[in-house]
Amino acid sequence: MLILNAPEAEFKADDHAEGYEFNPNSDVVESIFKAGYHFRDLGTAQVRAISRAVREMAPDITAHLGSSWRVINVKSWSVRSDTVQQGPNAWHLDGFPVGTFKVMVYLTPIGKATGTTEIRLADDSTTILEGGSGTYLLFDPSVIWHRGVAPTEAATERTHIEITLMRSAATDLRYAHGGLNSAYPRLPWARRPIYPAD
Ligand SMILES: [Fe+2]
């Protein structure tokens, strides 16, 4: 509920932290993300809740990846029946570096009526994900074609958290957020600086 009730954050093309890859087509991304994508402004309470969820999912993620990993980005947004089928909701591959994965945590039930994610399998068949709230999907978004699917029901909103992670030499579950127009850090192996408070 913390995230479902979080205030909306306005998408701005220049919202990308230093060192992060971002989409440079500012006019295009702004017009798509302002056409029905509702980003959440994640404050301290939401970050804590997401960090707890990451800790809970961590053993499963490690088992599936068979390696250490680190969190490199977190975003949350929702779609409604009037959200354009462009951007994340058009068939695409993310084009992220090898070893980058995404965990989509659905906070609302997913299915045709309520909105979901559709993936295309190796034999070209497609399948939509179905499940209750709390369902999550770990996948390689640069290998598996996918798209978000807006709900068909007018009064429904599909909300999820998108956690981007990358294989790394040591597991690091710390929260990372590069801004709404960020994709991944260019130097994901770099340590993060820590400045002690004076
Ligand atoms: Fe994607």
Image: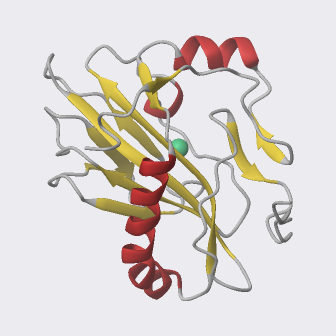
Residue 107 horizontal/vertical position (percent): 27, 48
Taking depth in this image into account, of 90 and 30 the one nearest to the observer is 30
Q: Is residue 84 above or below residue 183?
A: above
Q: Quadrant of the N terminus?
A: top left
Which residue is drawn at the image coordinates 45% and 78% (left, top)?
Answer: 58
Taking depth in this image into account, of 133 and 115 the one nearest to the observer is 133
Which residue is drawn at the image coordinates 78% and 41% (left, top)?
Answer: 17
Q: Is residue 65 found left or right of 5 in the rendered image?
A: right
Q: Is residue 120 found left or right of 80 in the rendered image?
A: right
Q: Residue 155, located in which quarter of the rendered image? A: top left
Q: Is residue 86 found left or right of 105 in the rendered image?
A: right
Residue 7 horizontal/vertical position (percent): 41, 27
Residue 54 horizontal/vertical position (percent): 44, 68
Q: Is residue 113 above or below residue 177?
A: above
Q: Quadrant of the C terminus?
A: bottom right
Q: Is residue 58 above or below residue 132?
A: below
Residue 138 horizontal/vertical position (percent): 43, 65
